[in-house]
Image (spheres, grey):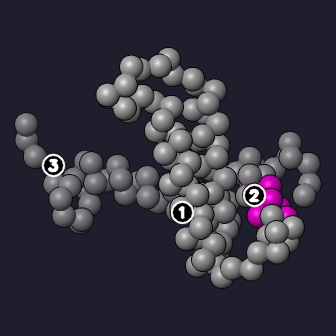
Amino acid sequence: MGSDETKDRLQVIFELQKALDTDIAERRRLDFTAEQWIQKDVLAMVSELAELLDEVNFKWWKNPKEMDNEALCGELVDILHFFISMCIRAGMDADKLYQGYIAKNKENFDRQYGRSEKTGYEVTAE
């Protein structure tokens, strides 16, 4: 890895995650297929999403606690770890993720303004 200051931040995240994933697999002698890894990453992400949900007082049957923004942000970072792992295992790099996001964001805007061929997004008069 070169100097992090001269690299794109998303690229740095991908490189750090790949190094962590490789280290964990080697240290723990884990040998799963890409599909098995993605299944495990999804389950881990679901667990992290549940932890995130606990931070935002979704339990209407309990007295709310003050939201801990630092804990909330920590859970989001945990989710990102597993998301980036899945991207890597699916053969995506930072550039491919970026390009896919840009294309999907444009499509999402197009859908909202009736500029999409996809059904269910037609603009109706209010």
Q: Determine the secondary structure under disc 3.
A: loop
Q: Determine the secondary structure under disc 2.
A: helix
Q: Which mark is residue 42?
A: 1
Q: Is residue 50 above or below residue 63?
A: below
- Report the residue at 42% width, 28% height from top: 57
Q: Percent from the top left, x then y, of residue 108? A: 35, 53
Q: Which residue is mark 2?
A: 17
Q: Amino acid at mark 2?
A: Gln
Q: Is residue 1 magenta?
A: no
Q: Which residues are magenta?
A: 16-23
Residue at the front extreme of this rendering: 62
Q: Percent from the top left, x then y, of residue 59? A: 37, 32
Count all numbered tags in the image, as a single digit.
3
Local crowd at mark 1 within 10 Å, few (<14), some, or many (≥20)?
some
Q: Determine the secondary structure under disc 1.
A: helix
> Is 4 left or right of 37, judged from the image as shown?
right
Label 1 or label 3, whichever comes before in sequence order: 1
Nearest to viewer (mark 1 / mark 3): 1
Q: Amino acid at mark 3?
A: Val
Quarter of the image where the N terminus is located: bottom right
Q: Is residue 25 above or below residue 81?
A: below
Q: Amino acid at mark 1?
A: Val
> Is 49 left or right of 114, judged from the image as shown?
right
The prevailing secondary structure element of the residues shown in magenta is helix
Q: Which residue is mark 3?
A: 123
